Image: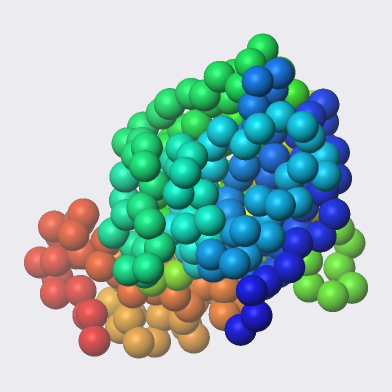
Amino acid sequence: MGPGTIGAWRELADRVWVAVAEPEAVNLGLIAGDDGCLLIDCGSNREHGDLIRRSIGTVTAAPLIGVVVTHAHYDHANGLGAFADITTIGHESVRGELPADVPAPTRELAVAGGLDLGGRRVEIAHLGRGHTEGDLLIVVPDAQVVFAGDLIESAMPDGAEPTDSTRAAPWWGSDSVPHEWPATLDGLVGLMTDTSQAVPGHGEPVGREFVFDQRGRVAAVAGELQRLALDGVPQAEALERGEWPYPKEHIAGGIAPGYAQLAAERPEVGRRQLPLA
Ligand SMILES: [Zn+2]
């Protein structure tokens, strides 16, 4: 795998930029204040991080004072080694998820924190689990922009309308928390107004209606997992027998953690000997 690439920075709101990096067509964010700027997500390896860091000077003279990783997945966090001389911020769970050669964030958040960029304050919050254990939201209140990582996705299959929320799908991995994800998205919806923009981890920025709609589908996945488990459908058959609002390949990784969480949270399911095989 090569070091990765970065596309042009595009100004989404006053001194808030987004660029698409490869691999994975991941959205990077950049927020500048009077005294410094903050990078959101940092590439897929150290060389990629270096490339991204060099690109920042093309859009702002504000010095880079921090990096925040939205979650621990490689395309968002594995460039951390390129930023070892400045503050790096992540959820406290990120440390345990990174490869050995990627340095952990130097400032670990459990719930929330803030950063003053000079005349502009950025809020960073963990509103709950969902796509991973450690999803962070980065809010720029004065620009009405929130970076949401992979809690939401708007990347479209080929040929779909760019704002068709029925076609864009998030990913459930083995580290996802399907039953808590909807409540976390309730928190995101609650942060947004009619004119807010949310930047997903992948895909175009979206408005509150899109997030609200995707929240409903994420809740439908959680509900279907619960129905299957309570009906006694074996875990190994759940993907095929379920009715899902998204293509099965997006859901597949969430079956095992979904069943495990239900067994842990619902004693009556455990007593009925929830089939886990
Ligand atoms: Zn991810």
Lateral position of residue 173 relative to residue 143, left or right: left
Name which residue lies at 43% across and 26% down.
Answer: 113
**Colour scheme employed for the rendering of this structure:** rainbow
Lateral position of residue 140 relative to residue 5, left or right: left
Query: Which quadrant would the C terminus be assigned to in this image?
Result: bottom left
Between residue 13 and residue 164, name the one nearer to us: 13
Q: Residue furthest front?
A: 85
Give the percent coordinates (x, y) of residue 66: 54, 37
Name which residue lies at 28% across and 59% down.
Answer: 96
222, above or below 148, in the image: below
64, above or below 4, in the image: above
177, above or below 246, in the image: above
Give the percent coordinates (x, y) of residue 249: 57, 80
Between residue 258 and residue 100, name the one nearer to us: 100
Name which residue lies at 59% across and 67% down.
Answer: 47
Lateral position of residue 138 relative to residue 125, left or right: right
